Image (cartoon, grey):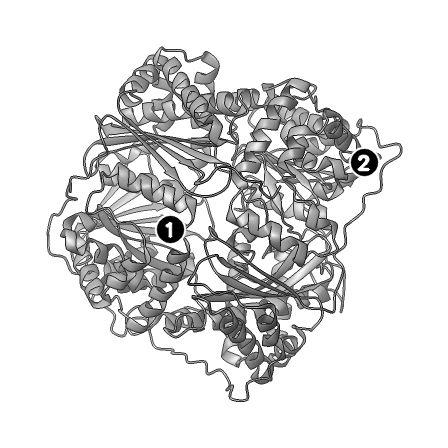
Amino acid sequence: MPSSPPASRALRATDAGAEFPVLHSSIPPPSRSVSLRSSLLALVLSGLVLAPHARAQSADAPLPFDSTVLRGRLPNGLHYLIRRNSLPEKRAELRLVVNAGSILEDEPQLGVAHFVEHMAFNGTKRFPKADLVNFLERVGVRFGPDLNAYTSFDETVYMLQIPTDTAAIVSKALDILEDWAHDLAFDSTEIRKERGVVVEEWRSGRGAQMRMTYKQFPVILRGSKYATRLPIGTRENLQSFPDSLARAFYRDWYRPDLMTVVAVGDFDPKKMEADVRQRFARIPAARKPRTREYAQVPGHEETYVSIESDKEYPNASVTLAWFGAPRRTRTTSEFRRSLVNGLYDRMVNARLSEISQRPDAPFAYGGSGRGSFTRTRDVLQLYAAVKGSDFVKAADALLAEAERVRRFGFTATELDRARVNYLRGLEQRYAERDKTNSSAFAGQYVASALNETPILNIGDEQKLAQRFAPTVTLEEVNALARASFPKQDRVVIVAAPDKPDIKLPTRAEMLAVFDRPADASLTAYVDSTSDAPLIATPPAPGKIVSETKLPETGILEWRLSNGAKVLLKPSDFKRDEVLFAAQSPGGLSLLPDTAVTQGELASMALSVGGLGTFNQTSLTKRLAGKRASVSSYISDTEQGLQGSASAKDLETLFQLAWLNMSQPRADSSAYAALRNQARSVLANQRNDPGTIFRDTVTMVMSQHHPRTRLFVPELFDSIDVRRSLAIHRDRFADAGAFTFFLVGSFDPDSVRPLVERYLASLPASQRNEKAKDVGIRPPAGIVNTTVRAGIEPKAQNMIVFSGPCEYSIENRTVMSALRELLDIRLREVLREDKGGTYGAGVGANCSSIPYPNYRVTVSFGSAPERTEELTKEVFSVIESIQKGEVSDSNMTKIRELTIRGHETSLKQNNRWLAAMMDADEDGRDQRDFLRTPDRMLKVTKEQIRDAARLYLRNDRYARFTLLPATEEKKMVP
């Protein structure tokens, strides 16, 4: 199980329907928002705020509804949205959208809306107790990624991905959705057990971020019910509310007139519609329904100010926010308004990003964004990560840039770049119109259902954008700047660590930033651009000296004249996606101890320097309208590149790869800005319990090896960018030692001249290097380490089994099966039976580099007083597996989870790329990826038993426990 998701969600950058907080039963739904956990206020750094768009037939026509979507309303009030979509094949995404969340709780029901969501997985009329999860796992549905739900202020959404290759599975899945809608069991025993799980979810979300939220919300949402209805509720209420209150909330608000069924996937849409209508029409309408009211956030003339600190808070920030009525995009004029807003935000963010790259920048980074804050309130925000105590300086800088735009406007070149980048992104979306994942459509339809906005065909959206984008003028965007920051409904939010070296500003100081006269010395922004080619003198091409087709895989292998190898996998999984990578053995392991830090940060230091003759800012501008990026890395055991591109921008991708390897650029000024940013962030994390715990695990597991490095502020002071440049050049000097990978929508014949010019031309020196074993080993025997940090009443537990192993792809498969079994059993025992944790996570890895070794990690959160009890349960589960207690049902689950996952992986470029790189690194047959299901089907109970005995030894493990630094005190509920 993943750890607890955020207790809140803030702005959504892609539609106008997101709200926060949002709670989830397992993991978050596909993310389209920016979380308050980054200080409320790590806002949208980029991205055009565009809700659905459409064909413009008149000056202000309603936006049309996508005709490929079947929609309807049943007599009982339930709505449905259905679409056929074949990506992934033989899969469907189902959603039950309930237009009710924690805002509708009565005072005694705090936390009950979210609790009801949990109970949907603990027994229904047709699936008592754990039968629902058991059935789904047996058909390959994974709890978390495929089976999930979340509760927000104003909605609860249930999510289910299912196989559609048999009618029986589809029918059962619709049974589940129908039961969720009106037939939850609310078994008293299950309610009692689930209280413990939800309390542990409450506990896992506790920390500086949540404490700050509880301080900020009464200011930000003053006078509104939202301030007192965080979905998680209070621990006291979760432990004590009568069972009847959960049943009452379900009865009051889970009713057809507040529900929408969404179904998108590889099925017959007409049959799906008939099934939905037949099933859900029999749910009776509410006879005397309670009124579904929408909580309002009162407007205010006064500027609200929240200035808060916390000893464990990880960053310092200032946000200037302006709230207003919600704006939805339902007509062509609203579409155009949204487009103009988005272009404005893009240009502001580009300027703030450019400022942050200066060594004397007034903030570490800054941005602007707008979107939905609650269902009834939108927000526009300027924000900055603050260096030291420069809160006022950062706020002044944000307002100064806003004033510069207001006074002088944007430049024509800025608007052209913003426009071309927007249209280029839309062009790529259109190219992928029949290769869009069903989950993306489902997310769009959920937002449409909740916000009553149209669902638009991408073709209509593109036509409308092509019509309106060229008509947007500088005068129009500049006028928006003059109207964007009124005196009303304004909020200032300051958040920071409580540290002696950080001095918080006063309320008067923050208010004064709005009252200061405009700076008369401000000058117009100068947009420095260059049309010079990325590579001044193109390299003379080398040659492809041999070509081989690898059987069964569709992979081509080319050998180049400089000794390099290229593996190419043309695919039709996406219309306009090409993934690129390169790898070569060696990495930091070949550097002396004294140079490891310098080497580790080399790629980071050079990433802000630009490439060739372009600094980072000018390179970003030069690449406007291009969908291509490449970055370099140096890890412990290898060096490499990673990137992606649109098919039409492949030459740009290869040019960037060539520049990364042959003309990296050091920029001392840009690095100074990066160093200042990193120092500020890392210094503020020193009191974060999670960081302290992770750092302890890292050091203990390496036995404090001198080459083990922790990211601390001082690390960046030792970096000399010229030395980093020298290390980078050395690690990338021998192109003949590299394997390059290309996967996606390309024609090998069109790629051939690019490979010859930009890869085969790279210099080679035939070093024949391999990663060196530098002697880092985990501790032998039993190690128990307790870390005391933090003030919240929660514990984090980790058990690490590690050591040498006999490496083979077959042994890796058995270890994967063992991990799946542990994951299932620990969820059943620790979460479902004991109610002791929100989730247990199991990780397992077996590697041959730098020596054959394995690591299995079990982690879970809990109450401090239950760490010993639950740890014993972990070892009891392990002991049962070592005794061979593996059920036929769990063997079926393990196999189905693997096979179903592999079915979708076979149609994903990123999974092919990862598999190709893995096989190449190991020197294995590329067909091993195709054989994954066969290997898993051959795994026996006895092999899993023996693997548990071999890898999960009770005389060789490291146990880590994070406990509060002090005894539990009275906490904010």
Q: Amino acid at mark 1?
A: Leu
Residue shown at the point (74%, 69%) measured from the top left: 301
Of the numbered discs 1 and 2, the one sitting upstream in the chain is 2
- Residue 737 at x, y = what percent? 17, 50
925 lies above or below 917: above
304 horizontally vs 967: left or right: right
Task: Name the spot of residue 424 as percent of width and height, x first.
Answer: 51, 63
Relative to 720, residue 229 above or below: above
In the image, residue 744 above or below residue 286:
below
Q: Amino acid at mark 2?
A: Leu
Left or right, residue 913 beside residue 415: left
- The residue where tag 2 is placed is 74
Q: Is residue 378 left or right of residue 834?
A: right
Q: Is residue 66 visible?
A: no
* Closer-to-camera residue (160/886): 886
Q: Which residue position holds label 1?
A: 579
Q: Residue furthest right?
A: 288
